[in-house]
Image (cartoon, rainbow, N blue to C red):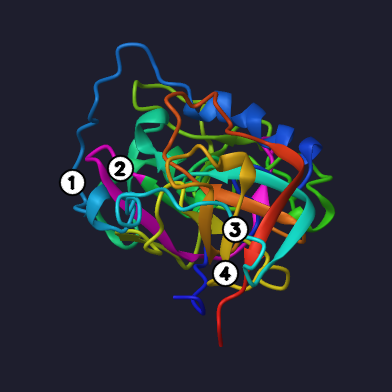
Amino acid sequence: MTGRRRPPRLFWTAAATTLAAFALLVAPAATLAAPLAGMPAVITGGPSSGGAPILSGGLAPTGKRNGKIPPPPSKHAHGRWLHGVTITEYWPAPESWFVGRPVKTPGLPGTHRIDWLYSATGVSMEGEGIGLDGRMYHINALGDGGWITAAGKPTSPSNNWQAGSPYWRAGGYWRNRTGGVTFPLAAAGWSAGVGRTYVPLANVSFAAGASLPLHYYQSIAVDPSVIPLGSRVYVPSYRHDGHGGWFVAQDTGGAINGLHIDVFRSPPTSSSDSGQYLTGKRIYVIKPRR
């Protein structure tokens, strides 16, 4: 697994490499993921897609070794401390947070909420999500094009989203009267005015199950040029997480560059909770034996 890198999260994660960029993503989240009052727990419109159950996809915590929480690294451990590390968090996007009309999508039977599939707070950005049926799904191929703003303008992480915060994939949406992004809502109507022209997204596909067998609060995404995949990493800031603060470097992400790690965790209870954002921290890295 240390050599496998999943296609999603190439552009962004639950938090970006700087606080300013991180704040850009939070604004659209309130619009896209705020639940509608009275919305049923499951939207009809097609059969369940039948993804992998959460606990069978490697997402359940593995528990303590021999019933004991591992201690911090000893002075004889074969690793090194890294200082000035930024720590963020990410999680599979819950479909229940989204408000779009369920639509068909390549790779999955049945239907799923359109904003959960294609928005900057959904599966296309986070890589995977938890469907309304409680099962895990992931994006299998990112498709053509990058990201656009709510106004429908191209934007890119290569320049820290200077053109504006990412709102949607460059396809899989309707243009409204002004050319901005709009999509049909599950409760009727449109998110930002009536859609006039549909913009398709070519070569995108989704799949059931998790893309990697990650574990909540035990797996992290890293920059492999700084922390090799397969490394054991001790994070003192998480020493009370139930696993002693130990993680395994198992994932990567386009916004995870340099001294930055992203902690894979269970989804928070609210879509307005953007997770921890810690800076200037230290971590201990034990590289895998070759």
Q: Mark 3 and mark 2: span between their CA atoms?
A: 38 Å
In the drawing, what numbered circle is on residue 231?
4
The span picked out in magenta is 130-151
**Quadrant in the picture for residue 207:** bottom left
Position above or below: 179 against 209: above
Label 4 Cα neighbours within 10 Å, binned few <14 / some 14-19 / many ≥20: many
Residue wearing tag 1: 48
Q: Earlier in the sequence, mark 3 or mark 4?
A: 3
Q: How many marks?
A: 4
- Viewport quadrant of the C terminus: bottom right
Q: Earlier in the sequence, mark 1 or mark 4?
A: 1
Residue 277 spot, x, y in % from top left: 68, 36
Residue wearing tag 2: 131
In the displayed orientation, state which residue is furthest to the bottom: 290
Q: Are marks 1 and 2 in contact (CB under 8 Å)?
A: yes
Under mark 4, the amino acid is Ser
Residue 135 on the magenta segment? yes
Q: Earlier in the sequence, mark 3 or mark 2?
A: 3
Tell me: 21 left or right of 269: right
Q: Secondary structure at mark 3?
A: loop
Q: Are marks 1 and 4 in contact (CB under 8 Å)?
A: no
Residue 94 on the magenta segment? no
